[in-house]
Amino acid sequence: MWPLRAVSRPCAILTWMQGILHVDLDAFYASVEQMLHPELAGRPVLVGGGVVLAASYEARAHGVAAPMGVKQALHLCPDAVVVNGSFENYGPISKQVMAICADMTPLVEQISIDEAFLDVRGSTHLLGSPDEIGQAIRQRVANEVGLPISVGIASTKFLAKVASGQAKPDGLLRPEDEIAWLHGLPVSVMWGVGPVRNATLAEYGIQTVGDLAQASKEHLTAWLGPGAANHFHALAWNRDGRSVRKPGRAGSMGSQSALGRGLTRETDLSVALLRIADRLSARLRKKGRAGRTITVRARFADMRAVTRAITLPAAVSTTAGLHSAAVELLADARREQPGPVTLVAISMSKLELAGPLQLELPFSVGDALHPGSPVGAAQLSVDEQIDKARERFGKDAVGRASVVLGGNRGVPDEFRELAEKD
């Protein structure tokens, strides 16, 4: 009997392992505008009114970035063309791109309107190598949709996303030696390393991912805290065990607002929370859902974030209920961390189907956080009438006075709805 002999094919094995793709449409909103309006092709384009929501690569070459005030952007790039945005087109175009991805593999995890992860390892025997599949996606998106798309290919979701970022614009990248390639990149490519954390790491001589990988866990813990130290050290060695998963039913819904340089007055913060609560509660009711856990996250000027949550005995979906709880939670968060609030978010979890309203005992007036009380039932009735009016006459047909009079909304709700995935 002949002995079995192991055949080593490291290149083929590595290529198969590098079967995670991250696809990312380049400057999506601006590219769509250039596609829909050929006269804008090759010109610097800014999408947004008072705030730049997206900038074409021609505008980015002048230092324009989102979110930036349009006035500041035009100062940097006087020749830029400002457009309001074709929000009604972005969703359908995104679905076209995701349908092309789904033709390549059933394992597509869309993470935003313009990007997704794909696991193509089960498709290589039919469609070719991951590189060939990535090129096929780019070709089809260009021919069938008319947009540029960048593709990163790696063995993990983390590195695939880093690779797609390095491939931009309109490119494809699969690093041969993943660790060596990753260690040569600046540490700012890592998820969670923003300007503040990047500056902190630079103070300790951490300039590249390789520097971070070679730093001791003790030093990283002292500089960043234990949780962040473990997270970044693992990513620096490309350890990311997350798999590509098709999205299921949402376990939570959320919405947030950036507040510029920050708000400090309680009345201003209350208006910001009301605007978010109005938007989020409308989404809940549209999907026939209600939630019992309300979470508020506040970010402060020093980039520190504080989170507070409350779980209610009964599920709510009213604007007044969300707003009432959010105001109290934010006030509690600010007792720990005073100062200007630069971002605030509300999320709802422990979601359930919104069934018939059951009146609560005893029959007291109650409040908005008790949906079965007279006040809670009245608030739901008001919200439902507002929903009907907005559906018939448009989203601006009915608004709450404090929100309408509270100043510029900044980012349009249409943009937020595209960005916020359920």
Image (cartoon, grey):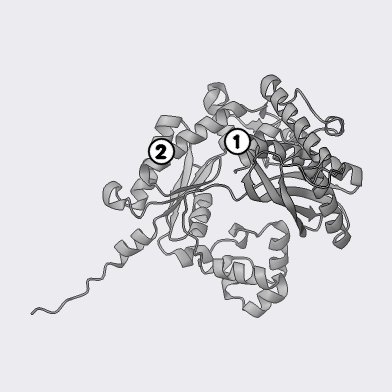
Q: Could you say which disc has been placed on residue 292 in the image?
A: none
Q: Quadrant of the N terminus?
A: bottom left
Q: Position of residue 302 (x, y in %)?
A: 80, 58
Q: Secondary structure at mark 2?
A: helix
**Residue 242 percent across, percent down from the top left:** 50, 61
Q: CA distance from mark 2 to mark 1?
A: 24 Å
> Looking at this rendering, what residue extends furthest in the left direction?
1
Do the numbered discs 2 and 1 sit on residues whose CB atoms are within 8 Å?
no
Q: Which mark is residue 100?
A: 2
Along the horizontal axis of the image, is 295 left or right of 99?
right
Between 95 and 212, the one lying in front of the other is 95
Looking at the rendered structure, the number of numbered marks drawn on it comes to 2
Q: Which residue is mark 1?
A: 56
> Image quadrant of residue 64?
top right
Is residue 61 visible to us here? no
Amino acid type at image mark 2: Ile
Residue at image location 32% in from the left, 50% down from the top = 123
Q: Which circle's residue, 2 or 1, is located before the other in the chain?
A: 1
Against 406, residue 134 (above or below) is below
Q: Position of residue 339 (x, y in %)?
A: 88, 55
Image quarter (top left, top right, bottom left or bottom right) of the C terminus: top right
* Rendering quarter of residue 222: bottom right
Identify which residue, 229 or 194, lies in the foreground: 229
Q: Residue furthest top?
A: 393
Give percent across and percent down for residue 8: 26, 71
Mark 1 neighbour class, 10 Å CA radius: few under 14, some 14 to 19, many 20 or more: many
Amino acid residing under circle 1: Ser
Circle 1 SS class: loop
Residue at the (61%, 29%) spot, across then down? 87
Which mark lies nearer to you, 2 or 1?
2
